[in-house]
Image (cartoon, helix red, strand yellow):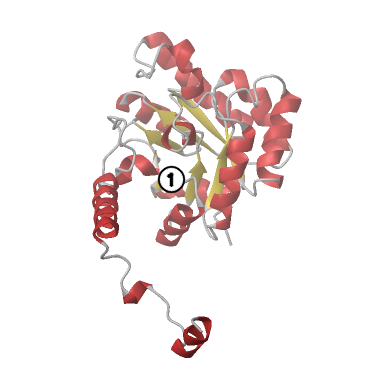
Amino acid sequence: MRVTINQIKEMKPKGEKVTMLTAYDYATAKIIDEVGIPLILVGDSLGMVVLGYESTIPVTMEDMLHHTRAVVRGTKQAMVIGDMPFMTYHISVAEALKNAARFIQDGGAQAVKLEGGVTVTEKVSRIVDCGIPVMGHIGLTPQSVNQLGGYKIQGKTPEAANKLLKDALALEEAGAFAIVLETVPTQLATLITQRISIPTIGIGAGIGCDGQVQIINDILGSFTDFVPKHAKQYSRLSDIMSSAITEYYNEVKAGSFPTAKQSFSMDESILAELNK
């Protein structure tokens, strides 16, 4: 039985922290699931950490569905959340509903996430009314990076802080089961967390949120282009991978790999027949 939105919402009044990680492939998702992480986000961040784009904007629905299916196949317990990419929910309510449904029907996800506050509440409400759980996302919204003027902290002025609070309240009213707060001052994120009844999940938003989310490549140190301030590297897989690949390369060049252990044999009498 997979984790449900009710189980996630019930964690807030109990004071239990919610943990979420991204995943983009079967093998990684399987490990995350076996550890017991309750929420796995197939983030459009795959555009940067998997596909090598400079932002999340080029990511398509087909990209997202391809990776979502892989993650779903690798999981049994975690709730898998599909991240709706740029311009797949902006045009109309009907378009948003159609694409959200694709994540559930074609991708096998159990919920979707979309960016925005007050401006997307009509779409959130309609998607929820049709039986699809929705996670909100406010603060730094990467799909709007060009309008925001870069990857900057959000909510530092009275006007911006008030807008984020209104966005959170509006998403709660629209039926979102949780809200991601990205790159928001700790004090503001804590206030928003206290003012709404659904869980907040922070990324660069401080310890006062109800939970945390990180990009798997950041915490494992496998993405080397840059390390975000909000990320802690629990490992340096890039170094481990480089060392292993270098060792393989050297052994092949030296003729020391493969050995008998990595090879297969056959009956010598058969080989003798071939040499006649």
- On the image, the x and y values in percent for residue 3 come to 54, 55
Q: Amino acid at mark 1?
A: Met
When asked about the image quadrant of residue 218, the answer is top left
> Position of 100 compared to 116: left or right?
right
**Residue 87's spot in the image, x, y percent?**
62, 22
Does residue 134 show up?
Answer: no
Tell me the crowding category of disc 1: few under 14, some 14 to 19, or many 20 or more residues within 10 angstroms, Cα based.
many
- Residue at the image position 25 percent from the left and 59 percent from the top: 251
Q: Quarter holding the N terminus?
A: bottom right
Image vertical order of residue 87 relative to residue 101, above or below = above
Q: Where residue 268 sits in the image (x, y, percent)? A: 44, 87
Relative to 38, 190 lies left or right: left
Residue 268 appears in view: yes
SS for callout 1:
strand
Please give the name of the residue rendered at 28% of the width and 53% of the height, measured from the top-left corner: 249
Furthest residue in direction front, as rendered:
276
The location of residue 113, given as percent across then percent down, is: 56, 35
Kindly indicate the quadrant of the structure image that contains residue 153: top left
Identify the residue at horizontal 71%, vertical 39% (top origin).
101
Q: Is 91 drawn above or below residue 110 in the view shown?
A: above
* Left or right, residue 137 beside residue 160: right
Q: Which residue is mark 1?
A: 20
Q: Residue at x 50, y 43 (%)?
A: 41
Figure disc tally: 1
